Amino acid sequence: MSRSLRFSMCRWMAVCSAVVALIAMANAPSAAPVARRGALRSGTLPDTVLAVVGGNRPVTVAAFRAAWRQVPPPGRADSLTPESAREFLDLLIGKELLAARAINQGVAWARTESLQFKAYRDNLLMRAVLDSLMDDVAREKLAGGDTLRDPQMLGIALRERTIPALHCQYDQGLASRLAELWGALPRPSPDSSIMAQVRLLGALPNIPPADTGGVLVSSDEGPFRASDLLEHWRRTDPMSRPRINSSEQILDLARNGIFERWLRRVASEQHPERRADVIHRLDDRREFLSVNRLVQRDVYGKMNRDSLVIRAWYAQHVDDFDIPDRYELAKLVMPDRAQASSMFMELRDRVRADSLIARGRRGGVEYRTEITAESDSALFALAHRVGPGAAVGPDSVAGGWRVARVLEYRPRRHRTFEEARTLAERQYSSIEGERLMREYLDRLRRDTAVQIHPRAGDIAASHP
């Protein structure tokens, strides 16, 4: 198998996810529905079908090309050869083998997968109705000479057209009190960690019991209470929540919640789950989750991750976890060459260089850095040439002029097992998982009828 198509186990589920989603076009609203699977007549396959798995699971040319386009570089070459096309077809056949086994065995989902499917179904149905309604808005605007096609703007236009028709009445006093509570939420510091920012952004306002049941908006969709607003806020991604400072912003949030409630009612009346394209996407999502569970059970579940096994793996592959040759430097980037030349003179003197490093640490700045031939080949080669104790620069780099002092050379060494344990576990899981996956697919292939077009590689490679 060529290097470009050698997928390790750690990437298998990501690749499998892309293949499942793309063959079914589960996440492509503009795509045509996938043909229903059914028993195919035996005999020569048409040139539109590259393979058939189990007599009723075709891999079409269109599905092949769609899946290939979704493989990220470097796994996807600029062009396909018949050989590489045949290799990728084997991957798609493997996906179909897994799906057939999962469906035939009726693999039971875990609770997390059931929740994932529920959320996916809800989003898909809402999206289907929303897209249909936005298409209506776009057609109306086009009839009036407006060529608006931006989905976000169409969604806003739909909401602005819908809300007045719901005869909303607002409690301005309650909106003002809620605005004060939302405005008092803590604001993360720009220099705080991502986790700290997420934690602060995830904070919820503490609404007094007297206001929790208060009706913020009355409309044809029923009362929208402060508790409904809080729940709507809770379900919003913390990283995309707007900053609320006024009662009008509170009411705008409420209008969003009322619009969503209206949209759900419309969805319940239109039954988008009966549409053929929606049925196909839901079927393929079920299949994808079942394949995931099957692989977890029959492949990952068979893997021995005992600490003695990992230690033995480490001993057999100890060189793979070596820390490479490296140099420790004191490195600075100055805004112009004159300042860099002045700093170069400081770094040439060991005492002044040590003092500079110490002052930087006291001020919260670390000038020391470690480089390898892989992380910075040019600077590593320069440090290797001049050796510890030498200063180098000024050199023009992105952001200014770089100067550095070579502090220490640290030769290559083995990581101890404690240092390498996480790396060893990851490598073992990747390689052993790939081996188990290939064995599993080989067994499935022996047990399942697979028909491949005799010119499959040529056909797949010749289509744009």
Image (cartoon, rainbow, N blue to C red):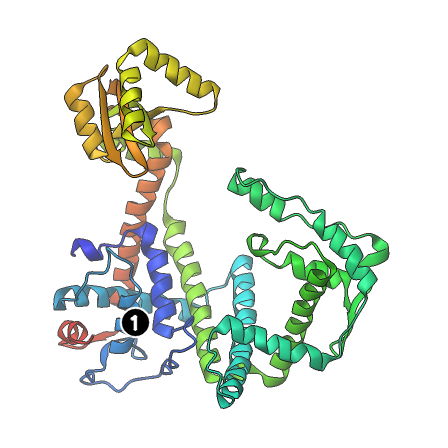
Identify the image quadrant of residue 7: bottom left
Observer-nearest of 196 and 330 = 330
Q: Is residue 340 left or right of residue 269?
A: left
Identify the image quadrant of residue 272: bottom right
**x 56%, y 56%: residue:** 240
Q: Is residue 279 left or right of residue 403?
A: right
Q: SS class of the residue under badge 1? A: helix
**x 30%, y 55%: residue:** 437
Q: In this view, does 257 lie above or below 270?
A: above
Furthest residue in direction bottom, as rendered = 143
Q: In this view, does 130 lie to the left or right of 28?
A: right
Observer-nearest of 84 and 410 = 410
Observer-nearest of 334 and 413 = 334
Disc 1 target residue: 66
Q: Give how far across and how far down residue 155 sits, in percent.
A: 55, 74
Q: Give how far across and how far down residue 397 sits, in percent.
A: 26, 36
Q: In this view, does 425 lie above or below 110?
A: above
**x 31%, y 41%: residue:** 428
